[in-house]
Image (cartoon, rainbow, N blue to C red):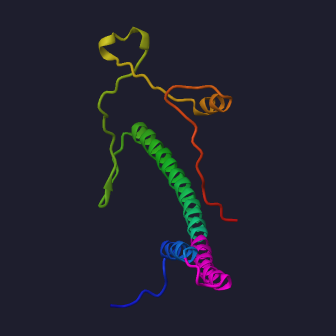
Amino acid sequence: MSAKATLTLYELSTDYLTALEELADRDDLPPDAIADTLDGLAGAWEDKALNVARYVRHLEVEAAAIEAVKHRLDARAKALGNYATRLKGYLKTELDRTGLRPKAPDLALRLQNNPPAVVVDDVTRIPALYSRTETLTTLRKAEIATALKAGQTIAGVHLEQTQRVVIT
C-alpha cells in the first residue's frame, strides 16, 4: 500500500479538532507543548486552506476566460449565421427573378415551396377551441425580502442567512 503524499483539508481539520479535544483533557502536558502542537497543526491546515483557495481562484479565472471565448464564438457564430441567411435571401430573390436552376457536381440550387403556414390576422376572432390560456406566476422575491426585513410576516416564506467564502 502506498502512503498519500499530503493530507486533505478535511483530514487536517479532523486532526486539528481531535488534537484540540484530546489536549484539552490532558493535565500532564505543559501549556507551551499544547500550544506548539496546536500551532503546528493549525499552520499545516492554514497552508492547505490557502492552497485550496489559490486553486479556487485559478479555476474561477479559467472559467471566466472560457466564458469570454464562448461569448466571442457565440457572437461570431451568430454573425456568420446572419450573413448566411442574408445570402440565402439574396440567392432566393435571384433564383426567383431569373428562373434558373444552377447545378454543379457538389450542389444544386432550386426553389421549393414550404409547407403552408398559419398567419394570424386577428387573434380576437379565433374560436376558443383553437387557443389555450396559460398562467405564469412569478414571485417578486425582492419585494418579499423588503417586507420581511421590515418585520412583516408572510406565510410560506422566511429569510435565511447563509455564508460564502471570500477570497481576497
Side (left or right) of 26 relative to 135: right
Residue drawn at 56 percent across, 60 percent down: 67
Q: Position of residue 165 (x, y in %)?
A: 61, 60
83 in the magenta segment? no
Residue drawn at 33 percent across, 44 percent down: 110
Q: Which residues are magenta?
A: 26-55
Residue drawn at 66 percent across, 33 percent down: 149
**How many dots with numbers?**
0
Q: Position of residue 68 (x, y in %)?
A: 59, 60
Foreground: 38 or 51?
38
43 in the magenta segment? yes
Up-down relation of residue 104 to residue 20 (above or below):
above
Up-down relation of residue 110 to residue 145 (above or below):
below
Foreground: 112 or 69?
69
Q: Quadrant of residue 146?
A: top right
Q: Position of residue 83 (x, y in %)?
A: 52, 49
Foreground: 5 or 21?
21
Query: In the current view of this chain or complex, which residue is farthest to the right?
Result: 168
Up-down relation of residue 163 to residue 27 (above or below):
above
Up-down relation of residue 166 to residue 9 (above or below):
above
Q: Position of residue 141 (x, y in %)?
A: 58, 33
Q: Quadrant of the C terminus?
A: bottom right
The dominant secondary structure in magenta is: helix
Query: In the current view of this chain or complex, which residue is farthest to the bottom?
Result: 2
Q: Quadrant of the N terminus?
A: bottom left
Residue drawn at 31 percent across, 60 percent down: 106
Foreground: 95 or 156?
156
